[in-house]
């Protein structure tokens, strides 16, 4: 069920351009994007840029989640809630697992984008290391991937 959720999120992310400048991308391709789709993609990208401080401060969630965390866009929140509804017996746990997986991925993305040897990068590396055991426990990460990420994060922290 978790794989289905992750696949659905991945599919939806592919529906929205990940380029930082949607206008240039549309011009470069020479294709016309319907105004609503263009606006949605632009809003999504603007929210992703603005969410960096929330991602840095974001903490993993536990228990039933009633309010959308600041680091989750409205679009992402709707998708995650809809996926969790597919599992009525474990809906609260699955929503928490999905939100934590999204937070982990956003922190990982922010870590990769941060300047080397910066305080933000070090903080994110520590946060990610702390989150890895839960990601493995919920099967959001397999142990081989977790070990690979752990070694990269540890090596980076050792270089400070």
Image: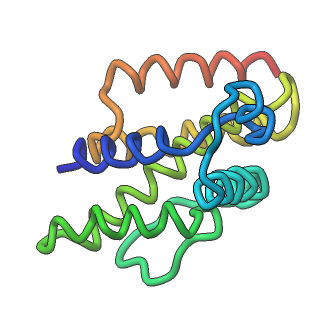
Q: Is residue 148 left or right of residue 31?
A: left
Q: Is residue 23 left or right of residue 147?
A: right
Q: In the figure, 127 relative to 129: above or below?
A: below
Q: In the figure, 11 relative to 153: above or below?
A: below
Give how far across and how far down residue 29 sits, in percent: 67, 26
**41 or 126, nearer to the observer:** 41
**154 or 9, nearer to the observer:** 9
Tell me which residue sits at (59%, 45%) in the image.
106
Tell me which residue sits at (34%, 18%) in the image.
144
Tell me which residue sits at (70%, 50%) in the image.
45
**127 or 84, nearer to the observer:** 84
Give how far across and how far down residue 22 sits, in percent: 73, 41
Q: In the figure, 156 relative to 32: above or below?
A: above
Residue farthest along the bottom direction in this orientation: 66
Tell me which residue sits at (87%, 31%) in the image.
118
Q: Is residue 43 left or right of residue 21?
A: left
Asked if one can make out residue 55 in the rendered structure from this viewpoint, the answer is no
Instruction: Tell me how the rendering is colored.
Output: rainbow
Q: Is residue 145 left or right of residue 94?
A: right
Residue farthest along the left direction in this orientation: 89
Asked if one can make out residue 86 in the rendered structure from this viewpoint, the answer is yes
Picture quarter containing residue 71?
A: bottom right
> Number of labelled discs?
0
Give how far across and how far down residue 44 sits, in percent: 65, 56
Q: In the figure, 82 relative to 14: above or below?
A: below
Give how far across and how far down residue 157 sits, in percent: 72, 25
Quarter of the figure that contains the C terminus: top right
Picture quarter containing residue 98?
A: bottom left
């Amino acid at each position: 069920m978790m794989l289905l959720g992750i696949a659905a999120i991945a599919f939806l992310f592919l529906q929205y351009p990940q380029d930082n400048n949607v206008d240039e991308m549309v011009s470069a391709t020479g294709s016309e994007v319907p105004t609503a789709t263009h606006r949605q993609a632009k809003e999504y990208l603007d929210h992703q840029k603005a969410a960096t401080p929330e991602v840095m401060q974001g903490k993993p969630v536990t228990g039933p989640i009633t309010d959308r965390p600041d680091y989750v866009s409205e679009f992402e929140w709707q998708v995650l809630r809809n996926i969790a509804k597919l599992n009525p017996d474990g809906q609260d746990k699955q929503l928490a697992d999905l939100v934590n997986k999204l937070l982990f991925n956003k922190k990982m993305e922010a870590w990769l984008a941060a300047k080397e040897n910066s305080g933000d990068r070090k903080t994110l590396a520590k946060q990610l290391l702390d989150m890895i055991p839960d990601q493995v426990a919920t099967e959001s990460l397999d142990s081989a991937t977790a070990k690979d990420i752990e070694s990269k994060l540890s090596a980076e922290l050792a270089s400070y």
